[in-house]
């Protein structure tokens, strides 16, 4: 599509349409509880959403509204009293301590530079955030597989392209991660990326691993090893840890850019602490703008997610979403739930979201090399543009940072962005997600409505130089 063509929605591309991005729940890690958060649906004319600032902070004056769908939950902590035995999934081990998190405040007008995150997040320690009620040091979760005995026949060879074949290739590379603190323990999932112990997971899975905390990794062969945090990036909800092992099986990282709506995918992780769990489904949509928040670090991430109906539940955070060739195409991060305010986080309802691996790869490389990551920046605040019928129809630009990418490109306050590189932009968050799918130095073509006319404007994205608050 040329830059002069009107924006068009492709099947499964930017499927949010005029209703804007999804606000989904960052899955709590299995064994933790969080209070659901609510995010505004759409927004009012003139509302501004900054894309960066302290970890993508949205000032607390941002009003909430719209239908009561919870955001991705904030990363869980191990603080607070347990709501009692049996909550929410039945009796829990004595080591578990549930927590409730405060609703995240949303941003109002604020001049914060738009930061392009590679991937966005899914909530505290957990994934398609997994929160675990059990401490893996003391309580082992049941496995989904059983060893063969003399009365069992060996399984038939799996045909190429089947769920069985794909799962067999990646299961050895997916691990369960347990984080234990003085308040309790919780579990998530991770993906082995090197033979010598490097594992990628969600930031919210290990966010609670502060002083005195321990991280334990349960390998697919049943061994448990200790691990340490190598690098974290709250803005993309990615983290890399190093396990004390030298004989691991790394997964093959594929390309999310080759995915198509309707294509078969498989999710692998440790939902509710059940390690090595395999579920399957299809790619339901691509480039779905998804928002997640972090109360502890006051951060917000927005990313263009892979949407899938493969079952993803608390505990899947940081686990693998793979294609039927057995290659990782996404990192499971969040779900949307049907729960309301004051209710416990829900399980799978067929709306799971994963960080595209193409956007995760550069961040992972930086975390391995430097322990922190850089992000693209447009340098402008952004809000929803609304038509007379109250539906959003683009992203309205607010304050333009002097000398930033938007300023250098000639963008002006009041401009309405309706497409990026030919893909329709229906809301402020959709623009945030589009920018965060790029890297510093990338050139993008924005379709801008100004004074009633649609014009293409090229912009070269800047960088936060690893300092998202600067």
Image (tube, rainbow, N blue to C red):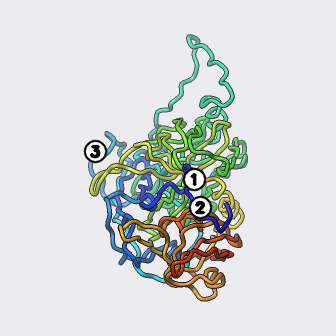
* Quadrant where the image shows the C terminus: bottom right
Classify mark 3: residues with Cα within 10 Å, few (<14), some (14-19) or many (20+): few
Residue at point 68% right, 43% down? 251
The percent coordinates of residue 201 (x first, y second) are 58, 53
* Quadrant where the image shows the N terminus: bottom right
Looking at the image, residue 23 lies above or below residue 86? below
Sequence-first tag of 1 and 2: 1
Res 423 label: 2
Classify mark 1: residues with Cα within 10 Å, few (<14), some (14-19) or many (20+): few
Sequence-first tag of 1 and 3: 1
Res 410 label: none
The percent coordinates of residue 380 (x first, y second) are 54, 80
Outermost front residue = 452
Disc 1 and disc 2 in contact, CB within 8 angstroms: yes
Residue at point 49% right, 82% down? 414
Q: Can residue 144 be seen in this view?
A: yes
Outermost top residue = 151
Looking at the image, residue 452 lies above or below residue 33? below
348 displayed left or right of 55: left
* Between 428 and 360, the one nearer to me in the picture: 428
Res 10 label: 1
- Label 2 residue SS: strand
- Label 3 residue SS: loop
Disc 2 and disc 3 in contact, CB within 8 angstroms: no
């Amino acid at each position: 599509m040329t830059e002069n063509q009107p924006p068009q929605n492709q099947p499964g591309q930017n499927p949010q349409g005029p209703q804007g991005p999804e606000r989904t729940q960052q899955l709590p890690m299995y064994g933790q509880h969080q209070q659901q958060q609510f995010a505004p649906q759409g927004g009012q004319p003139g509302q501004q959403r900054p894309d960066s600032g302290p970890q993508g902070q949205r000032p607390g004056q941002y009003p909430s509204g719209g239908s009561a769908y919870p955001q991705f939950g904030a990363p869980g902590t191990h603080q607070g009293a347990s709501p009692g035995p049996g909550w929410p999934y039945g009796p829990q081990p004595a080591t578990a301590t549930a927590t409730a998190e405060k609703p995240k405040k949303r941003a109002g007008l604020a001049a914060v530079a738009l930061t392009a995150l590679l991937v966005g997040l899914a909530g505290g320690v957990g994934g398609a955030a997994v929160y675990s009620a059990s401490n893996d040091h003391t309580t082992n979760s049941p496995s989904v597989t059983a060893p063969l005995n003399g009365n069992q026949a060996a399984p038939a060879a799996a045909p190429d392209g089947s769920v069985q074949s794909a799962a067999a290739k990646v299961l050895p590379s997916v691990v369960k991660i347990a984080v234990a603190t003085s308040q309790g323990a919780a579990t998530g999932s991770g993906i082995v990326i090197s033979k010598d112990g490097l594992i990628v997971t969600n930031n919210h899975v290990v966010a609670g691993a502060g002083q005195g905390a321990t991280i334990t990794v349960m390998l697919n062969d049943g061994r448990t090893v200790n691990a340490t945090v190598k690098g974290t990036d709250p803005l993309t909800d990615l983290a890399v840890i190093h396990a004390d092992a030298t004989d691991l099986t790394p997964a093959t990282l594929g390309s999310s850019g080759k995915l198509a709506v309707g294509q078969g995918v498989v999710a692998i992780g440790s939902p509710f602490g059940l390690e090595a769990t395999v579920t399957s489904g299809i790619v339901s949509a691509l480039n779905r703008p998804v928002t997640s928040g972090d109360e502890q670090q006051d951060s917000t991430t927005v990313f263009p997610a892979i949407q899938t109906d493969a079952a993803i539940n608390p505990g899947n955070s940081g686990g693998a979403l793979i294609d039927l060739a057995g290659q990782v195409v996404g990192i499971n991060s969040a779900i949307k739930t049907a729960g309301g305010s004051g209710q416990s986080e829900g399980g799978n309802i067929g709306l799971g979201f994963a960080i595209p691996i193409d956007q995760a790869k550069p961040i992972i490389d930086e975390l391995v090399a430097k322990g922190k990551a850089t992000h693209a920046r447009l340098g402008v605040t952004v809000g929803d543009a609304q038509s007379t019928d109250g539906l959003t129809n683009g992203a309205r630009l607010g304050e333009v940072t002097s000398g930033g990418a938007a300023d250098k490109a000639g963008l002006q306050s009041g401009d309405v962005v309706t497409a990026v590189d030919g893909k329709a932009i229906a809301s402020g968050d959709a623009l945030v997600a589009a920018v965060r799918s790029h890297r510093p130095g990338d050139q993008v073509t924005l379709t801008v409505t100004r004074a009633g006319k649609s014009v293409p404007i090229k912009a070269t994205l800047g960088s936060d130089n690893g300092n998202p608050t600067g």
